[in-house]
Image: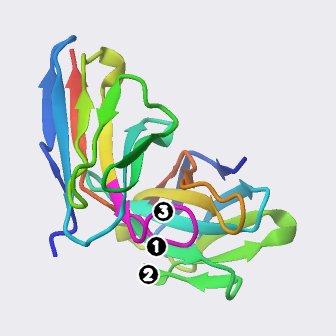
Amino acid sequence: AQSVTQLGSHVSVSEGALVLLRCNYSSSVPPYLFWYVQYPNQGLQLLLKYTSAATLVKGINGFEAEFKKSETSFHLTKPSAHMSDAAEYFCAVSDKGEGRDDKIIFGKGTRLHILP
Amino acid sequence: NAGVTQTPKFQVLKTGQSMTLQCAQDMNHEYMSWYRQDPGMGLRLIHYSVGAGITDQGEVPNGYNVSRSTTEDFPLRLLSAAPSQTSVYFCASSYPGTAGGEETQYFGPGTRLLVL
């Protein structure tokens, strides 16, 4: 069964500092992996996704994530945080290939706080 | 395109009342789903549909009904509201007929429901 673990329900970084949001997955088959962002009082929108092409995936707003199979990780990074990055971030996983279920599994989310 | 729309934005119910949360999309997506979002719980799948006339249960279906008579609409019905159903509800859609695989999900803005 698929699962996603996001380490840290809250992360605080200073404006201009590196952003690192951690995500580890569990999947019995090669996965597709996603990061979604939710700004206050809005729905989720896709930041980036890994679909087995390049392991380093670039997304919107300067974010990127690297798929590391050996570590079963898909951490999200941004070199320099901006105040507008304050939001909740969700990592998600879905199956590909045989045995794939019609669902995507979300992590519990990490709220990113940006300190001035 | 309006994308995924949800109505109402906010609703207060008394225990035992019924209501329908509306969801519509104009992207001709086959897959639609309903999630609830609770603090510290991430998004949990309630029901989903892979096409008109086809629905299935997700992780937390009890107390909710759905139907899919058209591609565009996917209403969620609360038959007898309970305080435990106080939550934020999100509708999402994707193309083609599955949210597994690499398909991006598009989310509505959400409905905040308070059950007293």
Query: Along the line of sight, which residue is nearer the eye, B2 or B98?
Result: B98
Callouts 2 and 1 in the same chain: yes
Residue B11 spot, x, y in % from top left: 14, 32
The range drawn in magenta is B92-105
Q: Secondary structure at mark 1?
A: strand
CA gap, disc 2 and disc 3: 24 Å
| Proximity of marks 2 and 1: CB atoms separated by less than 8 Å | yes
Question: Which chain's residue wears label 1?
Answer: A
Instruction: Work out whether residue A69 or residue B23 is closer to the camera in this orientation and state it.
Output: B23
Q: Amino acid at mark 1?
A: Leu
Magenta highlight on residue B96: yes
Please name the residue shown 75% across and 56% down the image. A27
User: What is the x, y in percent for residue B116?
Assistant: 21, 14
Question: Which amino acid, mark 3?
Answer: Thr
Which secondary structure is most common in the magenta stretch?
A: loop
Task: Inspect the magenta stretch and tell me whether residue A55 lies in it.
Answer: no
Residue B64 lies, with reference to residue A110, above or below; the image says above
The reply to whether residue A115 is visible in this rendering is no
Residue A36 in view here: yes
Disc number placed over residue A60 in the picture, else none: 2
Q: On what subunit does the disc labeled 2 rest?
A: A
Give me the disc on residue B98: 3
Label 3 resides on the chain identified as B
Answer with the quarter of the image where residue A43 lies: bottom left
Q: Nearer the viewer, residue B103 or B70?
A: B70
The residue where tag 1 is placed is A47
